[in-house]
Image (spheres, rainbow, N blue to C red):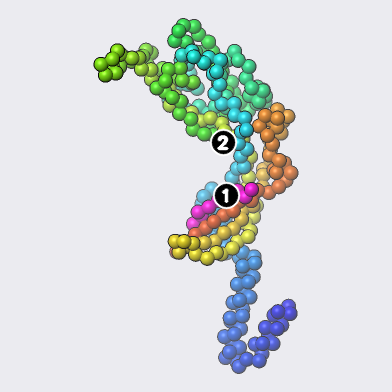
């Protein structure tokens, strides 16, 4: 209040016309200070609207695997094999795979545990070896696009014989000529693309927007604004807190301790409003 009282005394000593103009100027300064300090409800509402448009009011925090089970057919190394066409290996399917390997091999502990808990589903696929003989492969899948997981797209080498998860597109090989040399067998394989699990994720919900700060123009002359979006976890699932999970994959320590997740937001302010150009989790 001492600052406002001092301003009032100063205004009282000015001529009337100057008092009016000076009063407007001072109120503008005070208003700007309050707006800068609080972020302004208008800016906060505009930022929230942009996040809603970008579907960023709900997001995820993902723990990337330090150990990724992936595809492991090392025990069949050097043996050319083909998988039968099944609902998980058919040419028109796109499987979401946590782990795959020979059915007779012992699956990693985390795979067995998650299958027992109903998180993964195990499928047996018949396999034929080019040199003769048959076997079975075990493929462990997640539900399609399960939000509890992050995925990376993998393209098996479909021109190489014995490619993991490869199924023949035709019953037999196709012979092709290479220059003046002898004909070689070309095997066409499926699937061309799979989604392989790369991490485990926990859902987050936006709770508040804070630290709203207008900045100077950037190198391209655009007005820049920054802010912080604060997210809170909707809770970890039991299997994410199991001893096997912690031992093999790790833990969401910050979320378990109740820590909020903060994202730094960067906007360009243009004629049509705010444009989100940066959204990065603070470390």
| Separation of residues labelled 1 and 2 (CA atoms) | 17 Å
- Residue reaching furthest to the top: 132
Residue 262 position within the rendered picture, expressed as x and y whole percent measured from the top left: 64, 51
Give the residue pinned by disc 2: 150
* Direction from residue 183 to residue 165 in the image, left or right: right
Q: Magenta part mainly helix, strand or loop?
A: strand
Q: Does residue 184 lie above or below 218 as drawn? A: above
Give the residue pinned by disc 1: 280
Q: Does residue 72 lie above or below 249 as drawn? A: above
Q: Are there few (<14), some (14-19), or many (20+) residues within 10 Å of tag 1?
A: few
* Residue 155: mark: none
Residue 4 position within the rendered picture, expressed as x and y whole percent measured from the top left: 69, 80
| Residue lying at 33% horizontally and 14% vertically, measured from the top left | 184
Residue span colored magenta: 273-283
Please tell me in which quadrant of the rendered image residue 6 appears: bottom right
Residue 17 position within the rendered picture, expressed as x and y whole percent measured from the top left: 57, 91
Instruction: Confirm whether the magenta stretch covers residue 25.
Output: no
Residue 212 position within the rendered picture, expressed as x and y whole percent measured from the top left: 60, 61
Q: Does residue 9 lie above or below 178 as drawn? A: below
Regarding mark 1 in the picture, which secondary structure is present there?
A: strand
Regarding mark 2 in the picture, which secondary structure is present there?
A: strand
Please tell me in which quadrant of the rendered image residue 120 appears: top right
């Amino acid at each position: 209040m001492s600052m406002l009282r001092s301003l009032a005394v100063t205004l009282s000593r000015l001529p009337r016309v100057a008092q009016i103009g000076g009063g407007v100027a001072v109120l503008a300064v005070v208003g700007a200070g309050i707006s800068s300090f609080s972020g302004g409800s208008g800016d906060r509402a505009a930022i929230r609207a942009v996040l809603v448009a970008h579907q960023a009011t709900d997001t995820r925090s993902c723990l990337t695997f330090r150990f990724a089970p992936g595809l492991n057919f090392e025990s069949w190394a050097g043996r050319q094999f083909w998988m039968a066409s099944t609902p998980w290996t058919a040419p028109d399917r796109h499987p979401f795979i946590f782990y795959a390997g020979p059915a007779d091999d012992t699956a990693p502990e985390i795979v067995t545990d998650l299958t027992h808990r109903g998180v993964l589903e195990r499928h047996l696929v018949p396999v034929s070896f080019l040199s003769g003989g048959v076997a079975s492969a075990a493929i462990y899948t997640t539900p399609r696009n399960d939000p509890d997981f992050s995925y990376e797209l993998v393209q098996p080498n479909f021109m190489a014989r014995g490619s993991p998860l490869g199924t023949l597109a035709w019953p037999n090989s196709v012979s092709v000529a290479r220059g003046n040399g002898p004909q070689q067998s070309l095997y066409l394989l499926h699937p061309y693309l799979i989604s392989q699990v790369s991490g485990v994720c926990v859902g987050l919900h936006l709770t508040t927007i804070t630290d709203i700060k207008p900045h100077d123009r950037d190198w391209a002359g655009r007005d820049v604004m920054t802010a912080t979006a604060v997210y809170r976890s909707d809770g970890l699932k039991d299997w994410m807190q199991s001893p096997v999970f912690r031992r093999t994959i790790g833990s969401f320590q910050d979320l378990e301790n109740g820590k909020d997740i903060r994202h730094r937001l960067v906007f360009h302010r243009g004629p049509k409003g705010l444009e989100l150009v940066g959204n990065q989790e603070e470390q």
